[in-house]
Image (cartoon, rainbow, N blue to C red):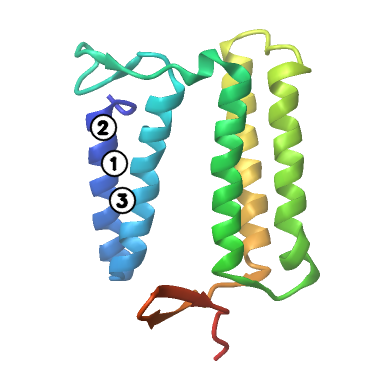
């Protein structure tokens, strides 16, 4: 039930309301819940038709980009680099690690991801896969959380012009 399209909508709403209750910030709640929802959209594009639309026995959706491993790798790499670009545009470094740490870490993660696809053997069984995935996720989250503390998040200043919106550097307090 947790990985279908309907479940993604439920997770999206749950995250939105929990963030609103916890922080009472509309923008933060919308952005975090959009991240949850976009993850299912990316899964629909990359996975074969195996994602349940409503319930486990309902029809399955998915475009199967993962069948084309190089195209899928480039697609997911572009998403990662776009997110990294937006992150760097809306924050600024406080330290040397804040300036270079996340970029270096992302290059390492891309190398590891590439290695898992093409260089390293598959884990021996499902338990090894689950344990290595869980351990990796916890380690990645901890490292990114620590690196994020090396940056400040004032957000961009949007200036309205007749020709549209433009973004300037973040404001200092």
Residue 160 x, y percent position in the rendering? 38, 81
At label 3, counting other C-alpha atoms closer than 10 Å, the crowd grade (few under 14, some 14-19, many 20 or more) is some
Q: Position of residue 96 (x, y in %)?
A: 80, 69
Residue placed furthest toward the bottom: 173
**Residue 100 on image: x %, y %:** 77, 61
In the rendered view, does 103 fall on the left or right side of 167? right
- The circle drawn on residue 15 is 3
Disc 2 to disc 1, how far (Cα)?
6 Å
Tag 3 and tag 1, C-beta contact below 8 Å: yes
Q: Which mark is residue 173?
A: none
Query: Which residue corresponds to the image point at 67% horizontal and 51% vertical from the top-left?
Result: 143
Taking 129 as reference, is 157 above or below it?
below
Q: Residues within 10 Å of mark 1 (few under 14, many from 20)?
A: some
Label 3 – label 2 distance at C-alpha: 12 Å
For the N terminus, the image quarter is top left
SS at circle 3: helix
Q: Earlier in the sequence, mark 3 or mark 2?
A: 2
Residue, disc 1 = 11
Vertical placement of residue 154 versus 55, above or below = below
Q: Residues within 10 Å of mark 2 (few under 14, many from 20)?
A: some
Secondary-structure class at tag 2: helix
Report the side of 39 relative to 138 (left or right). Answer: left
Q: Which residue in the protein does label 2 denote?
A: 7
- Residue in front for this viewpoint, 125 or 108: 108
Q: Please name whichever residue, 37 or 82, is drawn nearer the observer in this view of the structure.
A: 82
Residue that appears at 52% across and 13% down: 67
């Amino acid at each position: 039930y947790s990985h279908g399209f309907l479940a993604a909508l439920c997770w999206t709403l749950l995250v939105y309301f929990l963030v609103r209750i916890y922080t009472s910030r509309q923008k933060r709640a919308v952005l975090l819940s959009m991240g949850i929802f976009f993850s299912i959209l990316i899964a629909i594009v990359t996975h074969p038709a195996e994602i349940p639309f409503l319930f486990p026995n309902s029809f399955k959706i998915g475009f199967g980009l993962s069948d084309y491993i190089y195209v899928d790798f480039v697609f997911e790499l572009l998403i990662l680099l776009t997110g990294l670009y937006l992150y760097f545009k809306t924050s600024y470094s406080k330290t040397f690690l804040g300036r270079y740490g996340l970029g270096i870490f992302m290059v390492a993660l891309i190398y590891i991801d590439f290695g898992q696809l093409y260089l390293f053997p598959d884990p021996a069984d499902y338990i090894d896969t689950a344990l290595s995935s869980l351990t990796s996720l916890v380690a990645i989250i901890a490292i990114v959380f620590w690196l994020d503390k090396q940056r400040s998040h004032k957000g961009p200043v949007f200036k309205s012009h007749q020709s549209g919106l433009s973004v300037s550097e973040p404001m200092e307090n």
